[in-house]
Image (cartoon, rainbow, N blue to C red):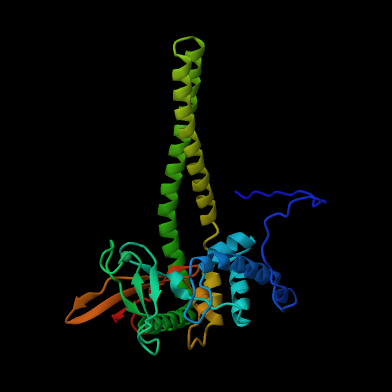
């Protein structure tokens, strides 16, 4: 996947592709990961500028996900997230949380709109990126940022309180849920894997037989080439599928420990009063916005919140804690 081209740097060697690392960064009190990440941003910013991605305050807007940082730095999610946080604290970047908000109907990202016609930002909102002023393929999925902010904050506070108060219940429920869904998923994946292994064996046999036929003159050379190429490309496809299935099956083994990680997060954010981008990024994996529904003359927008490490958390109704759910009128 990654190509490493290492050649000794001698007189006359062409300069390899490089990242711009601003000098002021070198002596800043930042981790090296944060510095490299900044160089990556700086590099990306060039493309953004060319495309006119400039914010009203003159900052360059660029799209760079935590996942991407993780991959490029070869680091864990936490290390990558910390690199973002360091930059934020040092006012090198401003993070937007729009990357977390998705449409429930089409799965696309919701995008963030600032209204220039208003003096304050009370009308800033999110829209489904497939809505395109009613000419696109999806509904509007409109939600004001301030509404979303309030509801997400409320939901996080309520959930974290529940998790802290009923630590054992929460752990048990998550594990049970995890077990059940993991088992079902694992079974499906194992089945798919064994199916693909079986098909591989069959293809091996078919190719072998084709070869024999061609040697014995029962099959023309041209026909043999054509058929074997076809089967080999199918094999290559299956091999790829099998590799990714194996990896997924392997990865799933490591997931149970994540409940513990989430509990640690819950403890750390025990006194959460407001949200900023780094908090949201650390706690939340994904926010899904449903289309508004009218019930009894009021519009309801359902918001689903998927937490980091554990996904959706249902607060049981029979607990003394306030009502569950992510559902409240918008
Ligand atoms: Zn949509």
Residue 171 horizontal side relative to residue 77, left or right? left
Total labels: the figure holds: 0
Q: Residue at x 49, y 14 (%)?
A: 214
Q: Looking at the image, can residue 68 be seen?
A: yes
Q: State the residue in front, 262 or 49.
A: 49
Q: Residue at x 70, y 75 (%)?
A: 25
Q: Looking at the rendering, which quadrant does residue 288 occupy?
A: bottom left
Q: Residue at x 25, y 67 (%)?
A: 134
Q: Residue at x 36, y 62 (%)?
A: 107
Q: Position of residue 252 (x, y in %)?
A: 51, 56
Q: Position of residue 198 (x, y in %)?
A: 45, 33
Q: State the residue in front, 163 or 15.
A: 15
- Taking the view exactly as shown, the residue that stands out farthest to the left is 296
Q: Looking at the rendering, which quadrant does residue 102 occupy?
A: bottom left
Q: Position of residue 181 (x, y in %)?
A: 41, 58
Residue 301 horizontal side relative to residue 102, left or right? left
């Amino acid at each position: 996947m990654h190509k490493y081209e290492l050649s000794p740097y001698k007189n006359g060697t062409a300069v390899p592709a490089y990242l711009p690392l601003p000098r002021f960064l070198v002596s800043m009190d930042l981790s090296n990961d944060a510095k490299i990440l900044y160089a990556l941003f700086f590099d990306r910013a060039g493309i953004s500028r060319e495309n006119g991605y400039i914010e009203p305050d003159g900052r360059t807007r660029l799209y760079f996900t935590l996942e991407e940082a993780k991959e490029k730095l070869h680091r864990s999610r936490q290390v990558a997230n910390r690199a973002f946080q360091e930059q934020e604290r040092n006012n090198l970047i401003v993070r937007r949380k729009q990357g977390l908000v998705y449409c429930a109907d089409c799965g696309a990202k919701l995008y963030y709109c600032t209204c220039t016609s208003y003096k304050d930002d009370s009308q800033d909102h999110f829209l489904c990126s497939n809505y395109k002023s009613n000419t696109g393929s999806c509904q509007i999925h409109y939600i004001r940022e301030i509404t979303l902010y309030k509801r997400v904050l409320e939901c996080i506070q309520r959930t974290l309180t529940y998790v802290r108060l009923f630590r054992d219940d929460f752990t048990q429920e998550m594990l049970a849920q995890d077990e059940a869904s993991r088992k079902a998923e694992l079974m499906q994946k194992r089945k798919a894997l064994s199916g693909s292994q079986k098909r591989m064996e069959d293809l091996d046999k078919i190719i072998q037989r084709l070869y024999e036929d061609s040697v014995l003159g029962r099959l023309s050379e041209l026909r043999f080439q054509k058929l074997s190429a076809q089967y080999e490309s199918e094999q290559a496809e299956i091999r790829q599928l099998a590799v990714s299935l194996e990896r997924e099956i392997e990865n799933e083994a490591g997931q149970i420990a994540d409940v513990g990680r989430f509990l640690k997060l819950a403890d750390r954010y025990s006194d959460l009063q407001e949200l900023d981008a780094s908090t949201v990024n650390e706690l939340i994996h994904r926010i899904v916005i449903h289309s508004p529904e009218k019930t009894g003359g009021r519009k309801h927008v359902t918001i689903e919140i998927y937490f980091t490490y554990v996904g959706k958390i249902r607060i049981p109704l029979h607990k003394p804690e306030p009502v569950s759910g992510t559902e409240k009128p918008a």
